[in-house]
Image (tube, grey):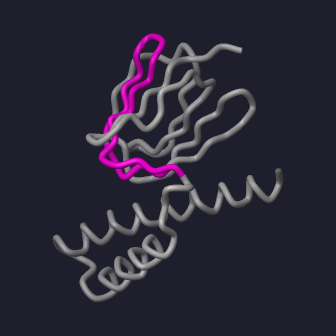
Amino acid sequence: MATFRLEIVTAERVVFSEDVSMVVAWGLEGQLGILPHHAPLMTMLQPGDLVIKKDDEEQYLAVSGGFLEVQQSKVIILADACERAEEIDVARAEAAKRCAEETLKTRPSGVDGAAAEVALRRSLARLKVVERMGRKRRKG
């Protein structure tokens, strides 16, 4: 099976650096899947979940935004922040979700509304990654 190198880097650390068969991320225009031999590409990332496929297994990470670049045999994600499911504090993510939803109800437009919308997307991505990992563990 063909693979490519996936590197996910934040300002603090290298989160992931392995050969994989596919990655699915959220770009500005929606979800995109990258397979080996993909055409060169550079895009901004929205907060969302990443799906990484390697050896018929899936891994899930939450990304809070950043950039994705596809090169000839490598994909680099420069993430604002990136967490594996086991690193996510579920109570904190749920609290952030409630806070963002409350802000959107009371101040839906303007700077506060835009920041709350991003915070909501970030918290939803974190919770989705935890949920997916939980389902995977229950199946296995």
Vertical arrangement, residue 64 with respect to residue 69, above or below: below
Q: Main secondary structure of the magenta part?
A: strand
The image shows residue 97, relative to residue 83, as above or below, that is: below
Q: Nearer the viewer, residue 78 or 25?
A: 78
Magenta-colored stretch includes residue 41? no
Q: Residue at x 57, y 61 (%)?
A: 128
Q: Nearer the viewer, residue 17 or 51?
A: 17
Residue 67 on the magenta segment:
yes
Of all residues, the one furthest to the right in this rendering is: 139
Residue numbers of the magenta segment: 62-84
Residue 43: horizontal and vertical position, in percent?
34, 34
Q: Is residue 33 left or right of residue 122?
A: right
* Residue drawn 49% across the image and 41% down it: 25
Quadrant position of the N terminus in the picture: top right
The percent coordinates of residue 35 (x first, y second) are 58, 23
Q: In this rendering, is residue 65 above or below 107? A: above
Quadrant in the rendering for residue 103:
bottom left
Numbered-mark total: 0
- Seen in the image, is 107 located left or right of residue 35? left
Residue 118 percent coordinates (x, y):
32, 63
Q: Position of residue 72 (x, y in %)?
A: 44, 11
Near-viewer residue (50 or 137): 137
Q: Residue at x 72, y 27 (%)?
A: 55
Q: Residue furthest left?
A: 111
Residue beneath the point at 69% across and 60% down: 134
